[in-house]
Amino acid sequence: MDEHAERRTEKRLRYYWPIWFAENFDDALTQGQMVDVSSRGAAFTCYTDGACPHPGQRITARFSVPRYGPDGSFDMENFIRPAHVCRIQNVNPFLRRIAVQFAEALPFKPGEQQTADPLETLEPANV
């Protein structure tokens, strides 16, 4: 059996934009780098310092997602979502990749948006 079989039911939008997070949003926020996002979760990288979350931790994240219009233009929509840290992978000695599941889904599926040009496609993440 293939251990790495795709289990995702929704394409993810791969993009690189800041994400801010903290265990308690009243605390100082830590900046990470978004890697990909779906309506139910996201993956981002952060430094391995003391502010990096751990598996099972609940955090609140503030981030923006591009939302495409029918003419191919887009606006960045801002979100704040409580999230559960599902998985952490070491990228290198200084960087970790964090996978989270949102407590409340986004109102659209970022990786499945249609753009005006049918030849232009969003790059879904396969990781």
Image (cartoon, rainbow, N blue to C red):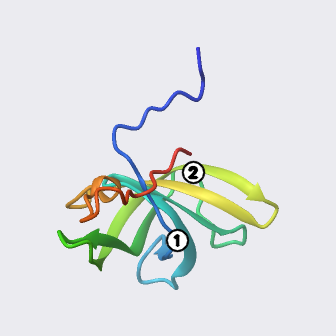
| Res 117 label | none
* In-image side of 39 versus 31 (left or right): left
- Mark 1, residue position: 16
Which residue lies most toward the right here?
93
Q: In this picture, is 110 found above or below 63? A: above
The residue lying at 62 percent from left, 51 percent from top is 88
Query: Residue 42: which quarter of the image?
Result: bottom left
Horizontal and vertical percent position of residue 102 = 35, 56
Residue type marked 2: Pro
- Mark 2, residue position: 55
Query: Residue 113: which quarter of the image?
Result: bottom left
Horizontal and vertical percent position of residue 21 = 48, 74
Q: Of helix, strand and loop, which one carries label 1?
A: loop
- Mark 2 residue crowding within 10 angstroms, few (<14) / some (14–19) / many (20+): few
Which residue lies most toward the top here?
1
User: Marks 1/2: CA distance?
Assistant: 23 Å
* In-image side of 1 versus 10 (left or right): right
Query: Residue 106: which quarter of the image?
Result: bottom left
* Sequence-first disc among 1 and 2: 1
Q: In this picture, is 94 found above or below 105? A: below
Horizontal and vertical percent position of residue 44 = 55, 63
Quarter the C terminus occupies: top right
The residue lying at 33 percent from left, 72 percent from top is 66
Quarter the N terminus occupies: top right
